[in-house]
Image: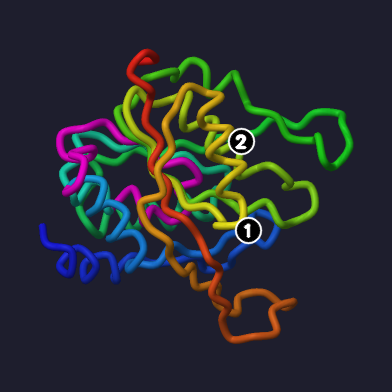
Amino acid sequence: MKLKQLEGYLGDVAAFRDPKVQLEQYPTTAHLASRILYTAESSFGDIDGKSVVDLGCGCGMLSIAAAMMGAKSVLGIDIDEDALEIAQENIGEFELDDTVELVKASLCAETTGNDDERLALNEDLVLPMQKKFDTAVLNPPFGTKPGNKGIDLLFLQAACTMVEGAVYSLHKTSTRDFLVKKAQSWGFDCEVLAELKFDVPMMYKFHKKKSVDVEVDLLRLSRKKAEQ
């Protein structure tokens, strides 16, 4: 499938009806999603015929894009029942029920620490899925809301645990050096595939501008040869 064709189809994916600020629910645009999945397949062969997991799948944009690019199976995981309801409707509209499965679960487990140490990886969910998938795709929360600090890193850690192959993830450019070092400590090589603008529209009461462009990196993490 050509890039423009994929983007055109994804333009019909319904977004959040009532986004939740604490979950940092900002829609992944058809423009971004098409480029992430098209690059993953056309440049690396990481989608067609592969098992894919979409962490924090929201309304299913990346899951649907993966399925349209030929994924053998896709598992979308999200904590929000309302988002999953929309995702299921989207999957039905695209007739992808046989390819995409959705699960309501949290990747994070709360601890008794202070706000900076509240979140930990939900090992009960993640460890049984260790190396179960070929590829992970995700657009995680940035971790800017109170109580969410470090959640972007936890999502990335979960993805790295769950894949045998590669992880594609969007992160603030300002966190690049930190994330590259973390990836290396987990036994992964980390490559910046593209520097992009993530359009954050006016969705919440505290937003003062119609939209804000956030500088983000599209990262590709792959297991080092000795780790495979």
Indicate whether residue 47 is drawn in magenta. Answer: yes
Front of the two marks 2 and 1: 2
Disc marking residue 154: 2
Determine the residue positioned at 48% across, 67% down. Answer: 198
Q: Nearer the viewer, residue 190 or 144?
A: 190
Please state the horizontal and vertical placement of residue 7, each as a whole percent of the image: 24, 67
Q: Residue furthest left?
A: 1
Residue 166 lies, with reference to residue 66, above or below; the image says: above
Give the magenta range: 42-64
Direction from residue 199 to residue 41 in the image, left or right: left
Which quadrant of the rendered structure holds the C terminus? top left
Category of crowding for the residue at label 1, using alpha-carbon neighbours closer than 10 angstroms: few (below 14), some (14–19), many (at least 20) = some
Q: Nearer the viewer, residue 105 or 173?
A: 173
Direction from residue 169 to residue 212 in the image, left or right: right
Residue 165 lies, with reference to residue 37, above or below; the image says: above
Category of crowding for the residue at label 2, using alpha-carbon neighbours closer than 10 angstroms: few (below 14), some (14–19), many (at least 20) = some
Q: Nearer the viewer, residue 17 or 163?
A: 163
Please state the horizontal and vertical placement of residue 125, each as a whole percent of the image: 55, 23
Give the amino acid type for the residue marked by disc 1 in the picture. Answer: Glu
Determine the residue positioned at 64% across, 61% down. Answer: 20
Please state the horizontal and vertical placement of residue 26, each as a whole percent of the image: 54, 64
The picture quadrant where one finds residue 185 is top right
Please state the horizontal and vertical placement of residue 155, each as a whole percent of the image: 56, 38
The picture quadrant where one finds residue 165 is top left
The colouring scheme, among rainbow, by chain, secondary structure or one colour, is rainbow
Residue 119 lies, with reference to residue 59, above or below; the image says: above
SS at circle 1: loop
Disc marking residue 24: 1
SS at circle 2: helix
Determine the residue positioned at 39% across, 19% down. Answer: 131
